[in-house]
Structures are given as structure tokens and as C-alpha cells.
Image: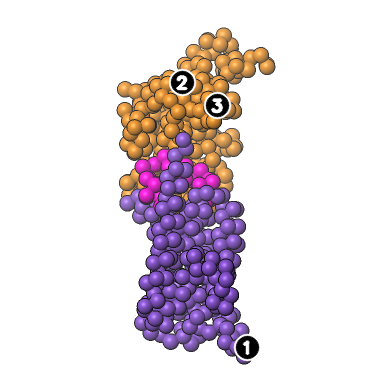
Amino acid sequence: MNAIKIMGLTKEYAGRRVVDRLELTVPAGELFALLGVNGAGKSTTIKMLSCLTVPTEGDAELMGHSVRRDSHQAKEILAVSPQETAIAPNLTVLENLELMAGIYGHPKGRPEEILAQLGLGQWTKARAKTLSGGWQRRLSIAMALVSQPEVLFLDEPTLGLDVLARRELWTVIRGLKGHTTIVLTTHYLEEAESLADRVGVMNAGRLRAVGTAEELKAMAGRGSFEDAFVALAGGEAAS
Amino acid sequence: MRIKAFAMRNLKEMLRDPLTLFFGLGFPMALLGLMTLIQRNIPVHIFELDTLAPGIAFFGLTFMALFSGLLLAKDRTSAFLARLTASPMTASDFLLGYLLPMLPMAAGQTAICLGAAVALGLPLNWNLLAAAASLIPSALLFIALGLLCGTLFNDKQVGGMCGALLTNATAFLAGIWFDLSLIGGPFGTVAYLLPFAHGVDGAKAALAGNWSALPGHLLWVCAWAAAIMALAVLLFRRRLVER
């Protein structure tokens, strides 16, 4: 079953096309990584899929719910962890999770379980604003998980984290594979290669290539994933 | 459920901010005490408690605009509101979630301010309760102004608009520190076209038991509050989802 079906999804700002007729399907349970240089259209795509921006043309379905016509139902089953850390600073870690549980209608549902899963148990009663950037980032992701979403969008989840924190977060994300459909955007190629079942490479608003890391390397005729990405993302001439 | 969860979050965010507590609850009380002290040491009657207390209670409500505006602007300019916008929350859930926790804050602030006036010598009677009730439309007016500013501006701009401009404009245009009828002219006309002077006059009328004057003032404030709230809702809905 396809969890995400994207059909000609397009976004224009003041006549400038930033996402151009995107076509893609993501099977349920897959972790799909969206790669691209700055301005490629990754974040705008995530915004359209998470009902934060109305597409100019085209549509997308999340578990059969259209993001245009049926956005309220789509929002019931999706969660997003935005690029910037998105937490309530004066609430404690536990209160942040309880807030999200309440908003999604799961009062006192699984906050403690999620806290343990992300190693946040020691900070339960700490105000969110007192946490370090890395822990705030984990909390931000925990807030996306507490509603047990069927489709999860992670927009550059490890941006600004140190190597150890990033690796720990990878373990958490791997743990979600199989039962949650995840779309992840990242600038870290090793992250996409390590975590993703399939990778899509975007450039100038268009999806240039889709496949496993191995398939993309073969497609580009390159031995390393980074070289394959550079070739597919249109940077070959510059390199 | 969603509104309750979000409203509780907003209440906690405000109550856990020491500046909110100082300006919201302590500052009007301090102002009242200071003005009463000045009155006791000057020969003319400017700051009498029966006119000063309703004015200061009204002035204190301007901080509701600052608090609601700052909270919304901070959420909007951080990614927090984007996260919630991707949740099943509707525009009504958001606005009620911001508005509802402000009401007990406003009620608490008014109670503290009028309570302090009683401690300073204002008679404790039913008119005092009526004066407090007459400030409800004014509280809604300032909350609506805050939500409007929070929808349109970032937190620094809201700080300037609601923290400096609105408080000063209110102080002058509401006739808190002086009798507007002494000035009259275009200033008086403008002041009475705006809702602030009516908010103060309504509370003064209630405290004095001048019931016939009350409905006119309250209706004027209610009309402004409704218009500004409607505008805030309209603009917030438009801004909630990028088009």
C-alpha cells in the first residue's frame, strides 16, 4: 500500500516555480530521503505534504487523504518535525509531550514511552528552554512521535547536532522504520545513505532521480554516493 | 480537548514568565500606590481613588495586549506554530486557545488592582464588583488587539507596538491621568471615537452607581472589541496556511 502518493505537485511563489510537477509514491513503512542543494524545493515539498502550504497545482494523498481537499483528515495521521526546533520553551519536557498528545486526542497516551525511547527520561521535569540545542532537537522530534503518526516528516532532523547526538538520533529513526512512513530531508549524504530505503534527488524544484543509494550510484556511474549525488543534483560541471 | 490542551500551555507559558507577572499583576498595583501617595502630598484633587482606581485597572489591561501579542508572535515566528498548524488544530482552536487563558489573567489583575484600591481606602461595595465586570469588554478589546498585532508583526515589533505605543496611547486617550473634558476639541472628539475613554468612563460610572451612563460606554467598547477580534480572526485564518 502506498502511504504517500504525489501527483504533479507544484508550487509557485510570485510566478517563480519552486516545486515543479513532482510525481512520487512512497510505500507504507518506507523511509524516503529527499536530498538536494539549498533551494532545491525540499522544504517546500514537505510544507505542501504536511498541509502548511497549499499547492499551486497538483495534489498529494497521505494514506488516501488529499492534502488539498481532505487536509483535516490528513493532519490527523501526519506529524512534522520542522527544520527549526519547535518546542514550548516554558513548559517542561513532559508537558511538551502531553501538549501534543492532548492536541492529537491521546491524553496521557505514550509520553513516558517516547521520552524513554529518545533518552529524554532524565529531563522529564526540566523546562524545555534550559536544555541544550541537541536535547531540544530530540524533544522536538519526540513531540512529532507522541501522536503515533502514520506519516512522519523530518525536515533536517540532525541539523546542528554533534556526531554522537546525530548517531543516537539515527538509532531512534531506524527504530521507527517499518511501522511509520518517514520522509526525511537532509544535507548529510551519509545520513540518507545510512537510513533511507530510497533516496530522491531534487534540483531546481524537480525530482531528478529516485532509487536506493546503490541504484543512484549505478545511475550516475559513480563509485561513491557523494559523487553520485553531485552528478545527479546537477553540480558536475562545477566539480 | 485540543483547545483545553493549547489554552493550558499558553497559561503556563505566561505564568512562568516573571516579566508577565510583574507587569501584569504588580505594576498596576505599584502605580496605584504611587499615585495615591502623590495625592496625599499635594493640595489639589487629581488622583482620587474613585476615579484613579478604575483608570489604573483599565490601564493594567493594556498588558493583556502585550502578553497575547507576544505569545502569538513568538509562536508564529518560531517553528512552534508551524508544528501545530500541521496538527488537526483549526483556526478557532488556535484563537480560543490564545484568548481563554487571558481571561483569568485579566480577572486576576483587575481583582488585585481594585483590591489594592480597597486597601488604600476605596469603599468595598457592590459597585466595585460592577466596575470589575464592566471591564470585561475592555479586557476582550486588549486581548483582540494583542492577537491582531501578534498575527501581523514579529515579537520585537509587538513589544514596541503593544508595550510602548499602545500603553502610552491608552494612558493619554483614555483620560486616566486627566479629565478629557478639560481638553475637548479634536483631541476629545478622537478620544471618544476610540474605545479607551469609554472603557474608563464605563468603569467609573459603575463604581459611582451611575447605571444610566453604563450601557452606552460598554456598547462602544464591545463594538470595537468585536470589530478588532473579527479582523484578527480573518487575518489569522489567512496566515495560518500559506497560499
Amino acid type at image mark 2? Arg
Element assignment for label 1: loop
Give me the chain that's orange: A
What separation in Å lies between label 3 and label 2 (alpha carbons)? 13 Å
Which quadrant, please, contains the C terminus of chain A? Answer: top right
Q: Position of residue B67 (x, y in %)?
A: 51, 60
Residue B115, placed above or below residue A198: below
Which quadrant, please, contains the N terminus of chain A? Answer: top left
Amino acid type at image mark 3? Arg
Along the viewing direction, whichever of A64 and B233 lies nearer the viewer: B233
Along the viewing direction, whichever of A222 and A113 lies nearer the viewer: A222
User: Does the image show residue B104?
Assistant: no
Report the residue marked by disc 2. Answer: A21
Q: Position of residue B134 (x, y in %)?
A: 40, 72
What separation in Å lies between label 3 and label 1 (alpha carbons)? 68 Å
Report the residue marked by disc 3. Answer: A16
Find the residue positioned furthest to the right.
A238
Asked if the residue at tag 2 contacts the one at tag 3, i.e. Cβ–Cβ closer than 8 Å, the answer is: no
The image quarter containing residue B186 is bottom right
Residue found 40% across the figure and 58% down from its top: B226
- Residue B42 - label: 1
Chain letter, disc 2 residue: A
Residue found 52% across the figure and 74% down from its top: B56
Colour used to depict chain B in the structure image: purple
Q: Position of residue B70 (x, y in %)?
A: 53, 55
Element assignment for label 3: strand
Residue A133, placed above or below residue A74: below
Callout 3: few (<14), some (14-19), or many (20+) C-alpha neighbours within 10 Å? few
Callout 2: few (<14), some (14-19), or many (20+) C-alpha neighbours within 10 Å? some
